[in-house]
């Protein structure tokens, strides 16, 4: 329909699963540690941005739990709908899928609730609720 | 025997009890403790009662509005509100029990279809399923279906829609989000695809296509911050202006000792109060049922694609949401004046639908036809989502609904399917 195909989805999947080289990994880890040092001296808005950047960096490294932790902190400080939001929703959905496959209802409910919360955040930010 | 008859005739016929029992089933299947099962079931029952109270408030306000509108403008002025339709169907029409059982049946058919076909969509927006169950029950009843058949047919059709709507939206959603793992679960999808088609036809093409996202637009819609405030923004002027047109003499006959304009103002607030109470009831009602059943669904279909509510797309195209809201509102207002010319009822604009359905449709329009496509497509979308509910008004009136029509366009499509195809077929055979 309308000339769309599965191609793009497949391409993006391929991209995200590409392995990070050792050199790039060192670079990312260094940048994460520098950012962590900066957090305490930053304003709230900057803190949210730094946490988002740290979360995205952890995600690139494939450290999903650390990524979720930082991205949640970022959104807790300031709701926003940038790359951090999109990555967090994707990670929640991945965790939800893993919980479903493991037949772990408790964990499944936790991630479903977290995804509900993401919908509310999207509504709030779009409508300008602080 | 006497006891069993008493239970069947006096307890199980109560919609609130049926709904509480459905929640109880879900909680037991989740292996919750006895305490949690009891409290969850009671909360669900309470939710139904709160919903009923909200419905009564809405009906009394809409009855008043209907009278002044007919006097003032010599035609019927219909408020598009799926909440009002649900409330009236559940209570005033006594279809609460059937709606509750259809709601459960839709969940079951959704799971069955996702489990055994290649379409792995599980519809997670509980409120939308309740609206779907309402419409399949009301129109199934209108077509002449009763009892178990009414529920099974409603469940099957609702279940098919719960899978088909995310499936037809998915090619677009993939393009918008760049991923295939999450789907869109919002029963306004036919409108979105309609806008995408119009936008493709009239919009910018190829390299000339410019996305709305390249424009700088105000990103916040302050007056929409609160759901109820945004309903009020429309209802207050609507009621007060209508009362003024109805004239002091007539409107005063309805307002007792209160000034007629003040009374209209208070009645418009009453409508918002009704929606507030009804939606609080819906939240309570679904608070226990939905987590239980979607947990079950996700475990039975482990490779499911969750179909989420429309805000899932907002982050990917925030400007298109604003353009979609504005253009859909414009389209609805055009339809409001044009439809009565063709003998249809006047459908008044609904702010919330214009925002959520319009905003999401804007994203689809921008995707297929850029800025120009989103603007033209949005106006068409507004007209389209006003036209279809207008076609239902005669049936709603004949069934005793007071001054309201449905909104979410996929549920309206289902209603038309019953009214135009299933009903006539039943009459033939």
Image (cartoon, helix red, strand yellow):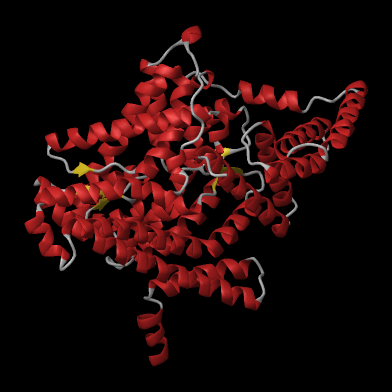
Q: Is residue A107 left or right of residue B239?
A: right
Q: Position of residue A72 (x, y in %)?
A: 72, 44
Q: Residue furthest bottom?
A: B2
Residue depicted at 52% across the width and 71% down the height: B43
Q: Is residue B288 above or below residue A124?
A: below
* Residue B89 appears in view: no
* Residue B124 appears in view: yes
Residue depicted at 65% across the width and 50% down the height: A114
Q: Residue furthest top?
A: B207
Q: What is the quadrant of residue B10 in the picture?
A: bottom left
Q: Position of residue A129 (x, y in %)?
A: 54, 44
Q: Is residue A30 left or right of residue B371?
A: right
Q: Position of residue B341 (x, y in %)?
A: 12, 34
Q: How many marks?
A: 0
Q: Is residue A126 above or below residue A76?
A: above
Q: Is the N terminus of chain B in the top left, top right, bottom left or bottom right quadrant?
A: bottom left
Q: Is residue B311 above or below residue B146?
A: above
Q: Is residue A109 above or below residue A75?
A: below
Q: Position of residue B317 (x, y in %)?
A: 53, 28
Residue in the foreground of this view, choosing between B377 and B171: B377
Q: What is the quadrant of residue B386 in the picture?
A: top left
Residue in the foreground of this view, choosing between B2 and B96: B96
Residue in the foreground of this view, choosing between B42 and B299: B42
Residue depicted at 80% across the width and 31% down the height: A57
């Amino acid at each position: 329909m309308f000339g769309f195909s599965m191609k793009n989805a497949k391409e993006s999947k391929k991209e995200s699963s590409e392995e990070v080289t050792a050199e790039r990994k060192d670079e990312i880890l260094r940048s994460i540690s520098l950012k962590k040092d900066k957090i305490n001296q930053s304003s709230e808005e900057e803190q949210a941005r730094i946490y988002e950047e740290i979360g995205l960096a952890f995600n690139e490294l494939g450290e999903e739990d650390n990524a979720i932790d930082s991205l949640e902190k970022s959104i807790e400080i300031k709701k926003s709908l940038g790359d951090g939001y999109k990555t967090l929703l994707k990670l929640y959905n991945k965790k939800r899928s893993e919980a479903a496959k493991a037949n772990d209802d408790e964990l499944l409910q936790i991630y479903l609730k977290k995804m509900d919360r993401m919908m509310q955040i999207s509504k709030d930010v779009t409508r300008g609720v602080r | 025997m006497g006891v069993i008859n008493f239970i069947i005739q006096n307890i199980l016929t109560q919609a609130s009890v049926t709904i509480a029992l459905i929640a109880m089933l879900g909680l037991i299947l989740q292996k919750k403790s006895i305490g949690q099962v009891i409290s969850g079931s009671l909360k669900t029952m309470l939710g139904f009662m709160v919903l009923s109270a909200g419905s009564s408030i809405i009906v009394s306000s809409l009855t008043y509005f209907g009278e002044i509108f007919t006097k003032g403008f010599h035609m019927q002025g219909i408020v598009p509100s799926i909440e009002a339709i649900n409330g009236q169907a559940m209570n005033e029409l006594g279809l609460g029990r059937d709606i509750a059982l259809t709601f459960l049946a839709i969940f079951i058919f959704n799971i069955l279809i996702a489990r055994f076909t290649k379409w792995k969509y599980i519809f997670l927006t509980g409120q939308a399923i309740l609206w779907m169950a309402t419409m399949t029950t009301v129109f199934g009843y209108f077509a002449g279906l009763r009892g178990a058949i009414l529920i099974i047919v409603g469940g099957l059709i609702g279940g098919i829609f719960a899978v088909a709507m995310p499936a037809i939206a998915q090619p677009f959603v993939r393009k918008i989000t760049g991923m295939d793992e999450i789907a869109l679960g919002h029963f306004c999808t036919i409108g979105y695809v309609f806008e995408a088609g119009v936008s493709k036809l009239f919009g910018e093409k190829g390299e000339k296509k410019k996305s709305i996202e390249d424009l700088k637009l105000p990103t916040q819609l302050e007056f929409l911050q609160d759901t109820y405030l945004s309903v009020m923004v429309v209802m207050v002027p609507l009621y007060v202006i209508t009362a003024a047109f109805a004239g002091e003499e007539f409107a005063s006959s309805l307002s007792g000792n209160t000034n007629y304009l003040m009374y209209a103002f208070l009645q418009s607030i009453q409508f918002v109060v009704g929606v507030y109470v009804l939606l609080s009831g819906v939240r309570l009602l679904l608070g226990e049922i939905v987590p239980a059943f979607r947990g079950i669904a996700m475990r039975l279909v482990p490779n499911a694609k969750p179909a989420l509510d429309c805000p899932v797309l907002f982050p990917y195209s925030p400007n298109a949401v604003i353009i979609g809201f504005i253009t859909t509102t414009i389209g609805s207002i055009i339809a409001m004046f044009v439809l009565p010319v063709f003998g249809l009822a006047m459908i008044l604009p609904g702010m919330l639908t214009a925002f959520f359905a319009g905003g999401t449709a804007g994203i689809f329009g921008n995707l297929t036809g850029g800025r120009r496509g989103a603007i033209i497509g949005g106006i068409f979308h507004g007209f389209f989502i006003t036209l279809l509910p207008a076609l239902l008004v005669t049936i709603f009136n004949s069934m005793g609904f007071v001054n309201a029509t449905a909104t979410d366009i996929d549920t309206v499509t289902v209603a038309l399917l019953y009214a135009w195809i299933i009903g006539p077929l039943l009459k033939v055979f």
